[in-house]
Image: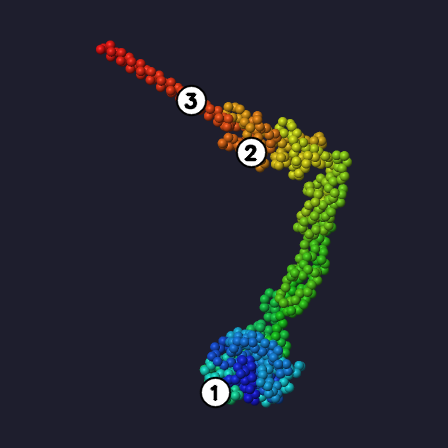
């Protein structure tokens, strides 16, 4: 094997992908195949994703690769970027780098790289996956490549998917063996710690399949151009003495190069998604092992797995349809039990005939259907196909059997509605779904009048009195429009005194009419209210059409009388504001006679205010009772003032007279007293 070519390629990869031009140390550690793995057409291995690595410097990568017979080199694995930036994600020798993507430091991405025969360039050739594409921490992913004979290209594989390809001029490795390595590139010392990474099932592509490498040997060393004055701090070690299963990284033994890691000892791996097949494990070389798988496995209701055969990989493996056979362990062998999942399709219908029932292969496309979309149950009843329970709305459909399916034909009842009329045009006849509403109508609603009479729509045979209505269909229906003769009839409003008053509208039998309307002969009508002076007034009066040409309607109205006078009984012309119970208002003057007489007021209470001298007066009236308001006027106040003044004058005059009388009596008494005294003397 030409390790210098591998080391040189890694130098280019690290220098270009990791963004570092030159490094001091290039450490490599892992396993290489023995002579028995030479002359292959590709290699592959499962490599554990261990991230983050928390490295202090350098650029770690983990990969499988090998030289080809013509000196070309090829490899596939994952790397962990040590710098954040925009990296070339696809580069070729012919076209250069054509794709770029942003990658953060510490992220893990798959990559593949190659160098053609006699390549002397210094650039990166290959591809890099999207950020984080190497899988979650602790997961195993398969990295490898193989020569595709049909295309003539080497296909790069990541978990079985082709992520790139290249023509390198050679179909095989020749005398070169594959390697599975870890690498720390561009380190300035040997202190970078690499958490151990597990690698298993290093295999080579021979005879159309991947076969585990029979012998594996340790390799721990330096890359080309690396300083070698410090010891390599990394190692490689088998895991539990298992064949083709080892780990690489720090704190592991550093065996001498060429030390055997495994040699001959084979493992039988059995992959079976269904059934409990237990004879997998490790076997001595050339041991005979029985293989058995049941023909059918019931998984769940409507789901079975049918065994179709084994697919073997490795020397001595078996590929074929027999469910019972034997193999000889000439290498690590993987036997995969292949199963065909079958699902049951249940097709049902309550009417007609359905087809399509049965077991079908998973993902197969199956036709199903019913014989007819309409099933008649009688002359006026039928069932109409609506859709299938899976959403399809045609009588014949196809279903992809990706699970058990129950498809039921959904039906809905239809009934025939027959609409007719002796007069006019009736509409609404036809088939209608149960529970739906059918618009029933007849036009015109009345014939041309002759004098004061005409024929008009009266009602439908089901009692509905609307010429147009929505009929809820719950069964077969026959509807006939009934016409009857009607006449013009006048409604005349009167007050309680028999006087004619004008009402704008009347409500008769729930309908609004003016003072003249059409009414059916012989039918009794009830007048419930009348619209008068901006109010609907309650009325409860019946009349029967045909008794006369008009009907008197007495409205609940009254006359409102208000008398305003002063305290002496004299009439007062006052300004009166009245608010009626219906919300209307009036402002009137009582005039020189002191009287307000409002005729035919809507029945109910009224209240308001009368503006008097100095103070307002409240008005409360209603139901025809006259209202008397005694008011104090300016004139009344003037009379009161004059009386008070006269009284005051009279009081003063009287007081003065009484004072003179008192003075005279006193003088007389004094004279009398003096005469007595003189007599005594």
Which residue occupies the foreground of this view, 175 or 289?
A: 175
Residue 513 visible: yes
Q: Earlier in the sequence, mark 3 or mark 2?
A: 2
Residue 12 placement, left or right of 442: left
Q: Residues within 10 Å of mark 2 (few under 14, many from 20)?
A: some
Of the 4 image quadrants, the one containing the N terminus is: bottom right
Q: Which residue is mark 1?
A: 255
Specify the quadrant of the image occupied by residue 388: bottom right
Closest to the camera, between mark 1 and mark 2, is 2
User: Residue 649 got which mark?
Assistant: 3
Q: Which residue is mark 2?
A: 577
Closest to the camera, between mark 3 and mark 2, is 3
User: How far across and down, in percent of the image, does residue 193 sit?
Assistant: 46, 80
Specify the quadrant of the image occupied by residue 447: top right
Marks 1/2: CA–CA distance: 119 Å
Specify the quadrant of the image occupied by residue 676: top left
Marks 3/2: CA–CA distance: 42 Å
User: How far across and down, in percent of the image, does residue 560 sit?
Assistant: 58, 29
Which residue is rendered at x = 63% and y = 78% of the image?
Answer: 320
Residue 231 placement, left or right of 215: left
User: How far across and down, in percent of the image, does residue 409 sit?
Assistant: 67, 59
Of the 4 image quadrants, the one containing the C terminus is: top left
Which residue occupies the foreground of this view, 672 or 349?
A: 672
Q: Residues within 10 Å of mark 1 (few under 14, many from 20)?
A: some
User: How far across and down, in percent of the image, does residue 479 sit?
Assistant: 72, 44
Asked which secondary structure carries label 1, the reply is: loop
Which residue occupies the foreground of this view, 44 or 338?
A: 44
Question: Do labels 1 and 3 touch, CB within 8 Å?
Answer: no
Q: Earlier in the sequence, mark 1 or mark 2?
A: 1
Q: Is residue 298 above or below residue 205?
A: above
């Amino acid at each position: 094997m030409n390790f210098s070519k591998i080391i040189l390629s890694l130098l280019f990869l690290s220098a270009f992908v990791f963004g570092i031009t030159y490094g001091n140390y290039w450490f490599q550690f892992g396993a290489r195949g023995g002579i028995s793995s030479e002359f292959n057409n590709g290699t592959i291995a499962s490599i554990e994703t261990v991230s983050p690595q928390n490295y202090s410097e350098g650029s770690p990568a983990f990969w499988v690769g090998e030289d080809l017979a013509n000196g070309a080199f090829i490899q596939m694995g994952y790397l962990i970027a040590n710098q954040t930036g925009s990296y070339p994600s696809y580069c070729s020798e012919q076209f250069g780098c054509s794709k770029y993507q942003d990658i953060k430091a510490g992220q893990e991405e798959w990559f593949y790289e190659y160098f053609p025969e006699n390549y002397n360039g210094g650039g990166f050739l290959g591809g890099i996956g999207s950020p984080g594409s190497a899988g979650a921490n602790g997961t195993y992913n398969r990295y490898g490549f193989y020569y595709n004979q049909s295309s003539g290209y080497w296909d790069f594989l990541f978990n079985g998917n082709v992520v790139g390809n290249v023509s390198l001029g050679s179909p095989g490795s020749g005398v070169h063996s594959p390697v599975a390595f870890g690498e720390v590139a561009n380190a300035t010392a040997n202190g970078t710690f690499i958490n151990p990474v597990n690698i298993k099932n290093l295999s080579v592509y021979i005879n159309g399949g991947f076969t585990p490498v029979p012998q594996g040997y340790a390799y721990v060393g330096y890359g080309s151009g690396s300083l070698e004055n410090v010891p390599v701090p990394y190692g490689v070690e088998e895991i539990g003495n298992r064949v083709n299963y080892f780990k690489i990284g720090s704190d592991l033994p550093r065996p001498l190069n060429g030390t055997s890691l495994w040699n001959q000892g084979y493992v039988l791996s059995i992959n079976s998604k269904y059934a409990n097949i237990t004879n997998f494990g490790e076997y001595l070389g050339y041991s005979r092992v029985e293989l058995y798988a049941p023909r059918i496995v019931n998984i769940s209701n409507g789901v079975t797995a049918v065994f179709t055969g084994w697919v073997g990989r490795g020397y001595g493996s078996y590929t074929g349809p027999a469910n019972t056979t034997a193999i000889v362990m000439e290498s690590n062998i993987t036997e995969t039990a292949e199963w065909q999942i079958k699902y049951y399709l249940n097709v049902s219908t309550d009417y007609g005939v359905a087809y399509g029932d049965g077991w079908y292969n998973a993902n197969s496309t199956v036709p199903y259907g019913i014989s007819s979309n309409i099933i008649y149950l009688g002359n006026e009843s039928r069932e109409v196909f609506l859709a299938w329970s899976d959403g399809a709305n045609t009588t014949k459909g196809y279903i992809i059997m990706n699970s058990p399916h129950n498809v039921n034909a959904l039906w809905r009842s239809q009934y025939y509605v027959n609409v007719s009329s002796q007069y006019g045009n009736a509409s609404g006849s036809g088939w209608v779904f149960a529970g739906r509403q059918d618009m029933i109508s007849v036009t015109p609603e009345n014939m041309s009048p002759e004098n004061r009479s005409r024929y008009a729509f009266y009602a439908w045979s089901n009692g509905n009195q609307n010429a147009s209505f929505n009929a809820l269909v719950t069964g077969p229906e026959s509807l006939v429009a009934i016409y009857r003769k009607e006449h013009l009839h006048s409604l005349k409003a009167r007050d309680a005194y028999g006087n004619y008053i004008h009402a704008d509208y009347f409500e008769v039998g729930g309908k609004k009419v003016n003072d003249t309307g059409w009414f059916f002969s012989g039918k009794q009508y009830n007048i419930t209210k009348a619209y008068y002076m901006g109010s609907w007034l309650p009325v409860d009066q019946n009349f029967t059409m045909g008794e006369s040409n008009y009907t008197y309607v007495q409205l609940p109205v009254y006359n409102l009388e208000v008398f305003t006078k002063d305290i002496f009984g004299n009439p007062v012309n006052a300004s009166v504001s009245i608010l009626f119970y219906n919300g209307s208002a009036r402002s009137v003057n009582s005039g020189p006679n002191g009287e307000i007489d409002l005729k035919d007021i809507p029945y109910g209470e009224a209240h308001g205010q009368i503006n008097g001298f100095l103070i307002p007066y409240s008005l409360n009236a209603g139901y025809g009772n006259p209202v008397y308001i005694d008011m104090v006027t300016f004139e009344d106040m003037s009379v009161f003032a004059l009386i008070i003044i006269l009284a005051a004058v009279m009081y003063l005059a009287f007081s003065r007279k009484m004072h003179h009388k008192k003075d005279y009596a006193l003088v007389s008494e004094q004279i009398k007293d003096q005469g007595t005294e003189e007599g005594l003397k």
